[in-house]
Image (tube, grey):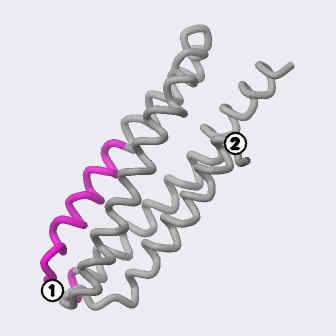
Amino acid sequence: MLNLIDQLRLEHTELSTSFGSLRDVDISSEEGRGRLKSIKSLLLSHLRRENEELYPKLREVATNDQKLGRTIEWFTRDTARITAVLILFFDQYADGGDKIAFMRDFKRLGTILNALIEQEEKFIFDEYSDIAVDNAA
């Protein structure tokens, strides 16, 4: 059975791959709109898991670790901001739209999403793994 971090990493891979697949989608088609809806659902499900299972445990430890507290605060704020922009993107193109604008937005948001995933895995997931190891010892 996979631990939480392994599951979240798999979800990150799926999110990144799924979002990247939008490059080849015709957003005016039913399939394209369905894919947008599916990826939005995947993103929201992933964020719910992080908010319910990952961040509460980190916040608990952060009560005694100011550096971790600041890191969590930064990621929480940044993730909320980026998520809001992604949701706007999904909603904006839910019924189709201008293909050139879609590609511009897709490229920009793909870069931002992948950077956030990379940073979260590097800092937050590693911190959580360290805590899990300390608790197991």
Residue 48: give x, y in percent of width and height.
40, 42
Q: Residue at x 52, y 73 (%)?
A: 17
Q: Nearer the viewer, mark 2 or mark 1?
A: 2
Count of numbered labels shown in the rendering? 2
Q: Position of residue 50 (x, y in %)?
A: 48, 40
Q: List x then y, in percent, for residue 40.
A: 32, 62
Q: What type of secondary structure mainly makes up the magenta span?
A: helix
Which amino acid type is shown beneath numbered disc 2? Asn
Q: Earlier in the sequence, mark 2 or mark 1?
A: 2
Q: Residue at x 18, y 89 (%)?
A: 28
State the mark number for residue 98. Answer: 1
Cβ atoms under marks 2 and 1 closer than 8 Å:
no
What residue lies at 57% left-to-right and 24% top-to-bottom? 58
Could you say which is closer to the camera, residue 82 or residue 10?
A: 10
Q: Is 71 placed above or below 69 here?
A: below
Q: Which residue is mark 2?
A: 3
Q: Residue furthest front?
A: 1
Quarter of image, res 24: bottom left
Apparent side of residue 125 relative to residue 133 in the rendered image (left or right): left
Q: Is residue 128 left or right of residue 55?
A: right
Residue pictured at 62% horizontal, 48% vertical: 121
Q: Is residue 42 magenta?
A: no
Q: Position of residue 51 (x, y in %)?
A: 43, 35
Which residues are the magenta region? 80-101
* Element type at mark 1: loop
Q: Is residue 100 magenta?
A: yes
Task: Reply above or below: 27 against 17.
Answer: below
Q: Secondary structure at mark 2?
A: loop
Tell me the kind of residue under disc 1. Asp
